[in-house]
Image (tube, rainbow, N blue to C red):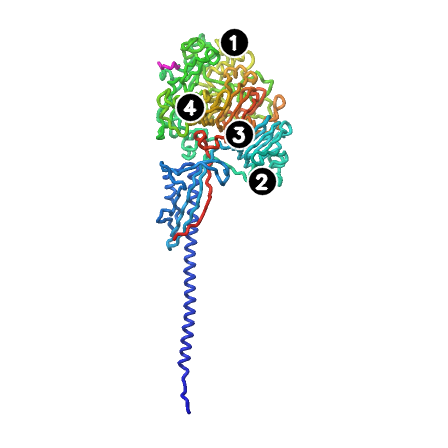
Amino acid sequence: MNRPVTSERGIALISVMLLLMLTSAVLAGFLATVNTDMSLRSVDRARTRALYAAHGALEKLTADLGDLFATNFAPSQEDLAALEADPPAMDQMVFEASDDLGYAIVPANGFDGDGNPVALSGTVTSGPYEGFVGLVTPYWLWVTAHGADGAEARLRRKVQTVSIPVFQFGVFSETDLSFFPGPEFNFGGRVHTNGNLFLAAGPGPLLLADKVTAFGEIVRSHLSSGQSITVNHTGNVRPITAPGTFRNLLTTEGSLVNTIGSAENEPTWTDRSIGTYHGYIRNGRTGAKNLQLPLVTVGGTPVNLIQRPVVGEDALITGQRMFAQANVRILLSDAADSITDLPGVSATEPIRLDTLASLVAGNANGVYAGTIQPAASSGVYNDGYRMGVDTPLIDGFLKVEYEDADGDWTDVTAEWLNLGFTRRNIEDADCAAIEPSPDAIIRFQRVKTVPSTGDVGTAECGGAVASDYWPLTLYDTREGKQRDDASGTSTFYLSGVMHYVEFDVNNFRRWLLGDIGINGEDVANEAGYTVYFSDRRGNADASGNETGEYGDEDRVNRADVDGDPDGVLEAGEDFNGDGTLQTYGQTPRYPAGMADVADPGAGAILAAATVTVPLNSAATPLSQITGANATARRNIAKANRPIFFRRAIKIVNGAQGQLPEDGFNLTAENPAYVMGPFNATNVAFADPHAPAAIIADAVTLLSPGWQDQVSFTQPNTPGARPRTTSYYRFATIAGKGISFPFAGTACSGACPPDFGTDGGTHNFLRYLESGGTLNYRGSIASFYYSRQATGLYKCCNNVYGAPTRGYNFDIEFLNPSLLPPKTPMFRDVNTTGFMQVTRR
């Protein structure tokens, strides 16, 4: 049987078709995979681009907040909004979100009723201020980046801005810091220096009861002068290893093998710093940081804190000066426009102090028209006066103004002057309770030793004519003498005659309360009251420009036993750091009408008919008043206008209960002399007390027993200026001297072992008296070298006799609410969290 033949061509076709379909499917799948991968890669690139954009924007937002915080530790909602309105410009990228978190700063604690981010007092948990209690403001920073291709990335960072008060340090120094106390010294509080730290004691011990940090080196073998501690400072230095536990830091355990310039002491130093002492003592190599004020970060220098602003300077620098932060200003200059040209002062013209007669005529407080030279007899200058007939001894221009709660400034110069400006006769015990100007806030003259007439009690206690008054002066032996030597007990130098304005703290408080005067109750209370003082009368460089500096840096002169000027800039003399020796302050600024004569003639204050005094156009700061009739000749120096820039402020009547209770800060561009007791009683640190600070070119403590007149009669015998027990409670920022090499320095005898240093922390607050007990509670900070009180550190033949020191850090300053007003702050921004946010 024949079978039909089957054709296989259809099957082959189907097979080919199936193969083609399979191949096409594989190809399609491959193409789809490629396309998907390309799409994913494109999306990934877009997302990566958005993520990088968000990162960059977040860094800008963080940096902008840090820059803002550097000059404004309490930025407002408007300040933050200005940052939010300035995102970075990136091609095809915007920073927007429907929930307003495209580019945003959100305070974690919200805003207060005034629209300011809420800051809380808290402990700093990271950064160089870890462990401090400060004002902490946490923020969330949000950035949402949108690309033109639809990609999006959102990042969130948590940061905290921290404000650390300077006065939370027990001791802080911008420059080299020294400790070399004699008896046991345990001040307390944290210690930091941006320079080198020199640690010694003799016999001590020196106890360092909190963290100690130095950005520079820690030297245990030498003083800052290069003098070996083996000479006189072989006592123990005992930093803590844990709270309440101390250990001797051996002389071989500093950060250097020897003194500055020697090799690093490794690994010994790191083992001790991080190991043995558990980080309680560090230098830059083991974790210490350089800590700077916002004033420095915006381009200023630390001394600008106390100086007047420079006309035309950056507003950021001006805003960081105490001049701008104060709510009361007292300004004195030789020319009115030196005051009125300053930024922000009120429009009222300053008052000329040599024309006060027209201002105060008939005043009920019995003030007088300044000290005026009486008529001369036969060409003889009476009573030692050197000014011409009818020429006042009080000169210059004065402006006093205050800021109200709205930020407006009002002139009150006439108001304050009409409260009086005269101190009693301080040389007559019968006049102790008879004050010509009991309500005066500032005083700049006093009843002279022997007034010719009287109308406020007795002839000795008052005066009805202007010639019965002298300027307020004291003699500062440290500023006068170049060397401290027992053989020079009779020397007296014009550079030590300090003309001061007296500031009465209690009367200032009474004015604020409305008990005296008119406008005091309108002064803005900004957690207390801050007074700024600057007296530049007689201050000018060779071009006639005010500098706020003494202008005589030629004060070390190591090769000369008396320290006589040598015209060469050397170590320890460049106080302003400009590399040039300033000597314009050695040229007398001779007042118009002043007699350029050597013989003042006979008079009531003179011991003999003919004595000479170098108060003339040939005088220098080191012109001496000595020899026969020295007391009479010194009276001439204190009874006339100064011919050198020797201006200061003396702070009086600041005992417990006499300060504004909400707080008090007095900042002076000049040296400050503080009469005890201050913010305490004569016998104790008592309550209630006020948060208080004194910031100045230098701070000298005077006991309740201090007498200006004795400083003139006994200028070189500290024992004749006995210190009575005194108590002072305030934080301080002040200048100090510059160390210079001990080796090669000449003195008339053997130089004291600590000569060449700045005096150390225990002598940072200056003295002019001898013996007794001095109790101080506060915080000590130094950000600059003194520019006016430039006398070298000296002790103990002529300048002072060391007191028994009761020095302690005021632990109340660890509570930000108990700090003095306008306490300078260190500021920082710390990142405490970061995350990418996925939106759904």
The residues bearing labels 1 and 2 have C-alpha atoms spaced at a distance of 68 Å
365 drawn magenta: yes
Residue 275 image offset from top left, x and y in percent: 59, 40
**Which residue corresponds to mark 3?**
574
Which residue occupies the foreground of this view, 326 or 475?
A: 326
Question: Can you name the residue that lies furthest to the right here?
Answer: 230
Quadrant of the rendering where the N terminus is positioned:
bottom left
Rendering coords of residue 449 (x, y %): 47, 11
Q: Choose top left, top right, bottom left or bottom right for residue 264.
A: top right
Question: What element does badge 3 sit on?
Answer: loop
Q: Which amino acid does label 4 sit on?
A: Ser
First in sequence: mark 1 or mark 4? 4
Q: At label 2, which amino acid type do we have?
A: Ile
Q: What element carries label 1?
A: loop
How would you classify the magenta stretch by its main secondary structure? loop
Separation of disc 2 and disc 3 at Cα? 37 Å
Q: Residue 87 appears at what percent x and percent y?
A: 39, 46
Residue wearing tag 1: 607
Mark 2 or 3 closer to N-term? 2
From which residue to which does the magenta span run?
A: 362-367
Mark 3–mark 1 distance (CA, rounded to whole Å): 41 Å
Element at label 2: helix
